[in-house]
Amino acid sequence: MKISTIISGKRVETISASASIHDLVNSLNSHHVGALVVSSDGKKIDGIVSERDIVRAMPGKLNQLVAMHVRDIMTVDVHTCTPESTIAELMTMMTELRIRHVPVVDESGSLLSIVSIGDVVKNHVGELDSERQALIDYVASAN
């Protein structure tokens, strides 16, 4: 199955690198997401920032966190995929790189959507269930 089936109708939320950590936390909460793509225009990817980045910034800096900005904690080396990527390819990438969110880009590198590990697992389980049911039907029809 291709990623294009997962992202159909799915929005991607972005945030500016200059946004405050307070704004970041509020945005993650209000959109009910675990990560935001950092972008100045909604198309070019400048980075990605997640709940995990906030937690990693906290030790020893808790009193400074309120004065920090997204650019201070975001990941700039962003791994992406395309709508033509497969769920299996994305599962491998996410597992090997230990990442939970992957932006989806078009052939020119413009941001289209984002896929979470939850999206990938849900669709993989759906594929396995369909295969299981097809095997059950096949065995039942042979009797």
Image: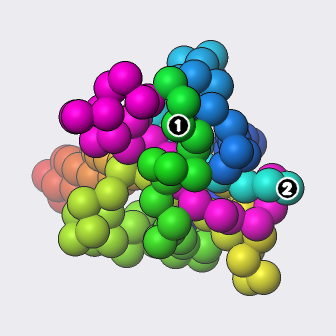
Q: Which residues are magenta?
A: 42-65
Left or right? Give the position of 61 relative to 71. Answer: left
The residue identified by callout 1 is 68
Q: Position of residue 44 (x, y in %)?
A: 76, 66
Colour logic: rainbow
Q: Is residue 102 above or below residue 34?
A: below
Q: Amino acid at mark 1?
A: Met
Judge the density around disc 1: few (<14), some (14-19), many (≥20) Cα neighbours within 10 Å: some
Q: Position of residue 93 (x, y in %)?
A: 33, 71
Q: Amino acid at mark 2?
A: Asp
Q: How many labels were placed on the picture?
A: 2
Q: Secondary structure at mark 2?
A: loop
Image point (63%, 32%), residue name = 20
The Cα–Cα distance between marks 1 and 2, rounded to whole angstroms, is 21 Å
Q: Quadrant of residue 67?
A: top right
Q: Is residue 89 above or below residue 67?
A: below
Q: Quadrant of residue 19?
A: top right
Judge the density around disc 2: few (<14), some (14-19), many (≥20) Cα neighbours within 10 Å: few
Q: Position of residue 56 (x, y in %)?
A: 28, 41
The residue identified by callout 2 is 41
In reply to whether residue 71 is colored magenta, the answer given is no
Q: Is residue 8 visible?
A: no
Pick the residue in front: 26 or 91: 26
Q: Viewer-nearest of labels 1 and 2?
A: 1
Image point (36%, 50%), residue name = 100
